[in-house]
Amino acid sequence: MSRRPTSTSRRFEDGGSMPFVGSLNPKSRPSPVVSIVLVVLGAFLIIGYLYSGSGGSAGKEALMKLEAGASCSSEVLKSIPLLKKVYGDSMHKILHVGPETCSVVSKLLKEDDTEAWGVEPYDLDDADAKCRSLVHKGIVRVADIKYSLPYSRNSFSLVIVSDALDYLSPKYLNKTLPELARVAADGIVVFSGYPGQRRAKVAELSKFGRPAKLRSSSWWIRYFVQISLAENESITKKFEQAATKSSYAPDCQIFHLKPHKK
Ligand SMILES: *[C@@H]1O[C@H](CO)[C@@H](O)[C@H](O)[C@H]1NC(C)=O
Ligand SMILES: *[C@@H]1O[C@H](CO)[C@@H](O)[C@H](O)[C@H]1NC(C)=O
């Protein structure tokens, strides 16, 4: 419409390259956001590299803990009423194995007629006072589950494991699952992630040493058969019926195994 700007533009041309210098310069400098992202990324890679070698005892900020823990251990918390319903008496002496075990054990200890212990497979650097007290009392232990568990045979009526198995290769599963079976008198409940549900995060890598390998339910069932662990079919059926009845749709796969006893 207005033709006036012609004079303005001519004035810019007259003023040499000044306006262009002004507009080009900031763009040629790397943006501070990009620099920060690169530095943070580099730091994560270094931390991940360092801890993958040392077996992992990272546990940086509470944020990482939250991200890594918001998973099947929280599903265990949600399923306690159903587990009580279907396992009845077998819920009297429980071992929970997995990240966030302090919160699972604290919750279980609030139930009537239930004793509970926990094994935290990773570090507890950022444990709160309540969790430190559970560790101090020997109720929660930090232990590498790739090796023997510090409990004798049939120490617990039920062993519940969440997330932890997702970080083990079959070689270590071959050691860990029989160990869980050894200390369990009545059964083992396995909570594991669905394939494609969670991505390996850099935070998880530094904490767990390797990304979670989320396996399908058919993979797990085949694997259980291979190491002679059978599903407890009556419990599995009861649990599914109870879940349907209370409209509970777990975000994790749940397997109910019999401990094989010779
Ligand atoms: C795990 O144990 C099963 C049964 O003993 C065996 O067939 C399989 O090869 C083992 N897997 C690994 C990776 O050691
Ligand atoms: C299934 O689990 C329940 C509860 O622990 C137990 O009482 C029952 O004996 C188990 N069934 C088999 C066939 O092992």
Image (tube, helix red, strand yellow):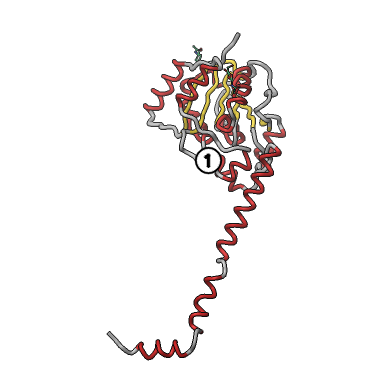
Residue most extreme to the top: 262
Residue 195, image x, y percentages:
46, 34
Task: Give left or right: position of 63 versus 20.
Answer: right
Please say if 26 is above or below 175.
below
Residue drawn at 66 percent across, 48 percent down: 46
Q: Where is the C terminus found, in terms of image quarters?
A: top right
Mark 1 residue CB less than 8 A from any atom of ligand 2: no
Q: Where's residue 163, x and y in %?
A: 55, 33
Residue with the mark numbered 1: 70
In the foreground, 77 or 213: 213
Where does residue 177 sit, x and y in percent of width and height?
59, 22
Counting every numbered tag in the picture gives 1
The image quarter in which residue 182 lies: top right
| Residue 243 located left or right of residue 127 | left
Label 1 crowd bin: few (<14), some (14–19), many (20+), radius 10 Å: few
Residue 134 or 197: which is nearer the viewer?
197
| Residue at the (67%, 34%) spot, across then down | 134
Residues 61 and 139: in front is 61
Secondary structure, mark 1, is loop
- Classify the position of the N terminus by image quarter: bottom left
Name the quarter showing ligand 1.
top right
Residue 136 position (above or below residue 160): below
| Amino acid at dot 1 | Ala
